Image: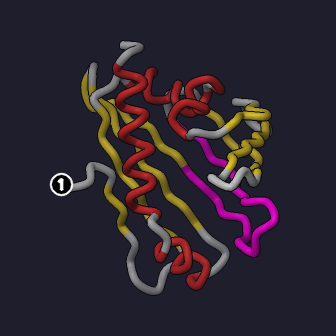
Amino acid sequence: MEQKTKINAEDGRQDFLITREFELPLELLFKAYEDPDIVEQWMGTKVLKLESKKQGSYQFETTDPKGNKHGFNGVIHEFIPNKKIIRTFEMENTPMGVQLEIYEFEQLTDDKSKLTMHVIYESVAQREQVLKLPFAQGINMAHNRIQNILNKLK
């Protein structure tokens, strides 16, 4: 089955673009990224902190099957409701560096919207390391969960 979330990763670059169209109104899609309760549901993580504002920050925690806790956090540099979020993302206690994430939200129709994520890594090698993981399947599954969870809130 074709994945609805598309990743455009050009060779030799330290970034990629992720796009997904949702059968959701723009305001509802944006809510999936600003409401801690909804974030916990689709990400499957615990939201320790989520300050949905310019110069806010966030801290999430997940537990692996062995019971080990893994944290990730970042700073929100720009927050324009229903339009754009620019933030950093850092996995704690890993050699992976900080990445920059630019989320742009676009209304296509009253009941359809699009998310474009521009993710920039510190190096080409770091980006390639991420792409070797089951990253594409994981982001597609997460986006499917957003669609399913928010369908219930329509």
Residue visible at 33% across and 51% down in the picture: 5
Coordinates of residue 55 in the picture (x, y in percent): 79, 39
Q: Is residue 108 above or below residue 60?
A: above
Q: For the N terminus, which image quadrant? A: bottom left
User: Bounds of the magenta span?
Assistant: 84-102
- Please, what is the dominant secondary structure of the magenta stretch? strand
Type of residue at label 1? Met
Q: Is residue 50 above or below residue 136?
A: above
Residue visible at 65% across and 35% down in the picture: 79
Residue furthest to the front in view is 66
Q: Nearer the viewer, residue 28 or 146?
A: 146
- The residue carrying pointer 1 sits among few (fewer than 14), some (14 to 19) or many (20 or more) residues within 10 Å by Cα, namely few
Residue 39 among those drawn in magenta? no
Coordinates of residue 37 in the picture (x, y in percent): 62, 23
Q: Circle 1 — which element? A: loop
Q: Is residue 23 above or below residue 9?
A: above
Relative to residue 53, is residue 13 drawn left or right? left
Q: Nearer the viewer, residue 36 or 118?
A: 36
Residue visible at 50% across and 58% down in the picture: 118
Q: Which residue is mark 1?
A: 1
